[in-house]
C-alpha cells in the first residue's frame, strides 16, 4: 500500500506499525518526532500504531546543540 512519508510517496506492507516504518528507514531507536495524519504519536504507542493506506507520515529527527 502507498503512504506519503515526509511528502514523498512510499510503498509499505499492510500491517506496518510506526516502529516497523522507522526500522525500514534506519531510524529505529533514534530520537525522532512522528506525526501520523497530522496527529503526534507518542513513542510508547509506536509498536501498536498502524500506518494505513494513504497515511501522511512526517518523521523529524531531533538534534541537540548548543
Image: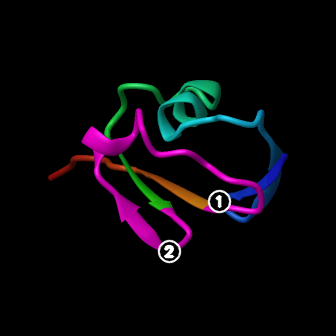
* Residue drawn where x is 15% and y is 53% of the image: 66
* Residue drawn where x is 37% and y is 64% of the image: 40
Whether 59 is drawn above or below 30: the answer is below
Q: Which mark is residue 27?
A: none
Whether 19 is drawn above or below 8: the answer is above
Marks 2 and 1 close (CB-CB < 8 Å): no
**Front one among 64 and 13:** 13
Which residue is under mark 2? Answer: 38
Dominant SS of magenta comes to loop
* Residue drawn where x is 50% and y is 74% of the image: 38
Query: Which contiguous range is marked in magenta?
Result: 36-56
Left or right: 43 as drawn, with respect to 27: left
Residue 41 in percent (x, y) is at 36, 56
Whether 16 is drawn above or below 4: the answer is above
**Front one among 56 and 50:** 50
- Which secondary structure, mark 2? loop
Residue 52 in percent (x, y) is at 67, 53
- Which secondary structure, mark 1? loop
30 magenta-colored: no
Which residue is under mark 1? Answer: 6
Left or right: 11 as drawn, with respect to 60: right
Residue 15 in percent (x, y) is at 66, 35
Other residues around mark 2 within 10 Å, as few (<14) / some (14–19) / many (≥20): few
42 magenta-colored: yes
Toward the bottom, the furthest residue is 38
N-terminal of the two: label 2 or label 1? 1
Whether 59 is drawn above or below 48: the answer is below
Other residues around mark 1 within 10 Å, as few (<14) / some (14–19) / many (≥20): few
* Residue drawn where x is 78% and y is 58% of the image: 8
Residue 1 in percent (x, y) is at 84, 46
Amino acid at each position: 500500500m502507498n503512504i506519503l512519508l515526509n511528502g514523498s510517496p512510499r510503498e509499505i506492507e499492510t500491517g506496518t506499525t510506526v516502529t516497523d516504518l522507522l526500522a525500514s528507514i534506519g531510524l529505529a531507536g533514534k530520537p525522532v518526532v512522528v506525526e501520523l495524519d497530522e496527529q503526534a504519536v507518542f513513542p510508547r504507542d509506536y509498536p501498536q500504531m498502524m500506518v494505513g493506506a494513504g497515511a501522511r507520515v512526517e518523521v523529524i529527527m531531533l538534534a541537540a546543540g548548543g
